[in-house]
Amino acid sequence: MGGFFGVAAKTDCVSDLFYGTDYHSHLGTKRGGMAVQNSSEIRRSIHNIESNYFRSKFDPDLPKFNGNTGIGVISDYDAQPLVIGSHLGSFAIVTVGRINNMSDLEKKAFRQKTHFTETAGGRTNPTELTAMLISEADSFEQGIRHAQEEIQGSCSMLLLTETGIYAARDRLGRTPISVGKKNGAFAAASESCAFPNLGYELDRHLGPGEVVRLTPDGCEQCLPPGEAMQVCAFLWVYYGYPASEYEGVNVEHVRNRCGAALARNDHIEIDCVAGIPDSGIGHAIGYAAEKQIPYVRPFVKYTPTWPRSFMPQNQTHRDLVARMKLIPIRKLIEGKKLLFCEDSIVRGTQLKGNVQILFDCGAEEVHMRPACPTLIYPCVFLNFSTSRSTLALAGRRIIHELEGENECHLPEYATAGSEKSHAMVDRIREELKLTSLKYQRLEDLVAAIGLPKEKVCTHCWDGSSFC
């Protein structure tokens, strides 16, 4: 996915930028970058962070940075920030999102004899493509509007310019941007959890398509928000950090409510409740509190030497990390009827191994309660579950086994309580060797978030969306 942080301050901003960007490390594993504007130039640094922490990679670079404005990014894909020279002046840019019409935009650019320099693996860097669209206009404000109109998918961005930092949320607000303030500084972040320990207080959440310009003296609105919004619901279920909030709704609070909703719809006899670390914990606490059943930790996560396990592309590596990071506590497992809350079941391969470990440690029963419905439709708006085939999704794979190439029944499988949904869930349960498996109902997930259904993107569960 990815996340970014930008700051405009009356004093040197490098420390805030460094730590503020680091607070987005849970959103990506491949590249990290920072760019700072000083009196004479934009200084930039980019590192591969696949095998190390952002902080340890960038700490040696800090002495060469100085300036009052800067932007940083953690990315799962392309190298960023980019520094662009244009008729608008030099600027640095970072983006988060996914451009679905890259090919069409590339062809249009080539017809105009435009070239791209930031290519890797034969593909154009989407951040450079976004910068090109911005540079086609007569001002940064007009350029951002032009880019958002041309891009299909989603693209939130920060632009570092001589006159401040432009923060622009994607047209339908699928990814969030929050603004924080303190004496002499304003900041923009994908995750509001970056603010408190740096002394910022949350000032506002940008609306869908809204553009603001940050300076040390304030936050100026450049383009107003649109009315339509489709913020990604998976932010609350899994991606978001517990201390963050989007649209004024805290992540951990939603997870507690998700767990409580699962509990209200459950009637099994168990000894205790647990969460698959880390994102399943908030859901499990909500379940345990609602049922008044003990919450325990039969799995603990070992993080000191396994820091980068977010979404490795290699399946063998994913399985290895899953097995090595979660350590079972036999004393809390043996002879117990355990219920686990999990954020979701994507492929199911890692979870299958963890379930087997529990039975090997003497568990009498293992029940699983994912906090969201079955993932059936690959995400087409953010870079989640996009590098794998559709059939890599556990639910979609089972549907293919049951229906072959016929996809006309997908809506019925996505309908909780339907005969086909029951058949799909039971097959997944058998594959994972679970005693029971029961997914969250979509209406309960939306209710836990607390926003109107039409303002929340639920495409990966029910296929509904608008562009």
Image: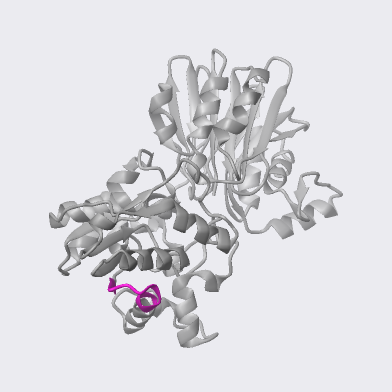
Spot occupied by residue 119 in the image (x, y as percentages of width and height): 77, 49
- Who's the residue at 50% across and 17% down the image? 217
Figure quadrant of residue 323:
bottom left
Q: Is residue 11 visible?
A: yes
- Who's the residue at 45% across and 31% down the image? 179
Q: Is residue 135 magenta?
A: no
Q: Is residue 430 magenta?
A: yes
Toward the left, the furthest residue is 292
- Who's the residue at 39% across and 63% down the image? 354
Toward the right, the furthest residue is 113
Does residue 92 lie above or below 147 as drawn?
Answer: above
Q: Nearer the viewer, residue 252 or 218?
A: 252
Q: Please report the bounds of the magenta region as a residue range.
A: 428-436
Spot occupied by residue 71 in the image (x, y as percentages of width and height): 59, 30
Figure quadrant of residue 192:
top left
Q: Nearer the viewer, residue 54 or 23?
A: 54
